Amino acid sequence: MAESDWDTVTVLRKKGPTAAQAKSKQAITAAQRRGEDVETTKKWSAGQNKQHLVTKNTAKLDRETEELHHERVSLEVGKVIQKGRQDKGMTQKDLATKINEKPQVIADYESGKAIPNNQVMGKVERAIGLKLRGKDIGQPLEAKPKKK
């Protein structure tokens, strides 16, 4: 009765090939002979330093005529911001501090390099008291009564 021990279990299992063995030519041909599915993919420029190579697609993209860029703040808006800020006697840094933005943001808006953001434009409008959006740019901002 010593042979029928229910607590011990012996499992015999053959290990599969390691990654290096599975990639070898012998392993691939053996798998093909057995009729298994073998997936092969060729790596693009494998083992070569071709990361900065100009391809046909790159040249085609360079010849593309359509300009893809973000709309920028118009120079008219930049001049209005500059005029309104100077009329109130503020520097770019003062205005930036007042609206909780970085001075570079104000500089970008004034030079026409910034991508318009309605939140920033609204804060600048209220700080300098001039309209920056819509058809009457540069006109005084009408104080609207707050709704409660």
Image (cartoon, helix red, strand yellow):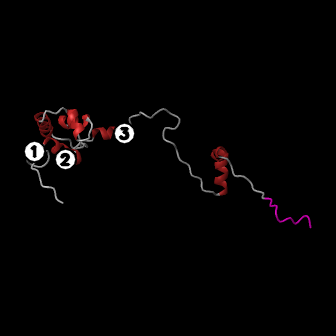
**Could you say where residue 133 lies in the image, as x and y percent from the top left?**
14, 47
In the displayed image of the protein, which residue is found farthest to the front? 148
Disc 2 or disc 3, which is closer to the eye?
A: 2
Q: In the figure, 126 relative to 51: above or below? A: below
Q: Residue at x 26, y 41 (%)?
A: 100
- Dot 3: within a 10 Å radius of its alpha carbon, few (fewer than 14), some, or many (20 or more) residues? few
Question: Magenta residues?
Answer: 1-10
* Label drawn at residue 122: 2
Q: Pick whichever, 7 or 143, lies toward us.
A: 143
Residue at x 30%, y 38% (from the top left corner): 62
| Mark 3 and mark 1: Cα distance apart in space | 47 Å
Quadrant location of residue 64? top left
Identified by mark 1, the residue type is Ile
Helix, strand or loop under label 2:
helix
79 sits to left or right of 28: left
Q: Which mark is residue 99?
A: none
**N-terminal-most mark, 1 or 2:** 2
The answer to whether residue 92 shows anywhere in this view is yes
- In the rendered view, would you say 25 is above or below 93? below
